[in-house]
Amino acid sequence: MSSSARSWSRAGAVLRGWRTRQWTVAGVGALATAILVGAPTDVVPNPLFGRSVPVQWWNYPALAVTAVLAGIVLTTYVRQPAAPSGPKTHNGGRLGMVGGALSFFAVGCPVCNKLVLLLLGASGALSYWAPLQPLLAVVSAGLLAEAALRRLSSQTVCPVTASA
């Protein structure tokens, strides 16, 4: 079995072992991420923010995937009550932060982004930035998935047998 397959297997085992507390944190984290990314980008309609360019069909699944993965990554930072104290790992933390930030740019309005407007202008934002946003969403999801995989894989503790 390859190391990648073992990592997925270990991550799946950790997810199956989660208790209600972990799933609750994951759900609350996913909801918070959906609001924190979706409201300012107006993918989640609200009276405070608007967009000049309509929401694209792929913005919704991109936001959903981002929210679920961010909720899982967030939950890996919650200490389990009966978990043995092992070595502290910080694998995937930066990947998760970068993935979350990229998702904001991926689902945001291409002409509402001041940095993009400054660099490319309105026509450049629509011609060059907007077509890159779906790719940015995939990269964002990939980074969040890798962060989740690393964090979950590092939560398993290998049993040590006593030597004679």
Image (spheres, rainbow, N blue to C red):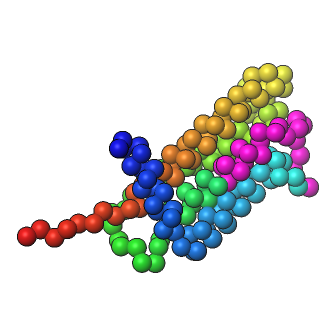
Q: Name the quarter where the N terminus is drawn.
A: top left
Magenta segment includes 30: no
Does 83 sit left or right of 41 as displayed? left
Residue 145 against residue 135 in the figure, above or below = below
Q: Between residues 145 and 120, which one lies in front from this camera angle?
A: 145
Q: Is 135 above or below relative to 51?
A: above
Residue 139, picture quadrant = top right
What residue do we see at 75% from left, 22% from top?
128
**Residue 57 lies in the magenta-colored region:** yes
The location of residue 65, given as percent across then percent down, is 67, 49
User: Residue placed at 79% from the left, 21% from the top?
Assistant: 127
Residue drawn at x 48%, y 68% is 17
Where is residue 46? Give x, y as percent.
88, 55
Which residue is found at the position 30% from the left and 62% from the top?
158
Q: Nearer the viewer, residue 61 or 103?
A: 61
**Position of residue 118 in the picture relative to residue 17 (left or right):** right
Residue 150 visible, this orientation: no
Q: Is residue 34 left or right of residue 95?
A: right
Rendering coords of residue 59 (x, y %): 77, 42
Q: Residue furthest bottom?
A: 81
Q: Is 88 rendered above or below residue 95?
A: below
Could you tell me which quadrant the C terminus lies in? bottom left
- Which residue appears farthest toward the front when viewing the image? 1
| Residues shaded magenta | 47-67
The number of numbered discs placed on residues in the rendered structure image is: 0
Q: Which residue occupies the extreme left position in the image?
A: 164
Percent of width and height locating residue 123: 84, 22
Q: Is residue 102 visible?
A: yes
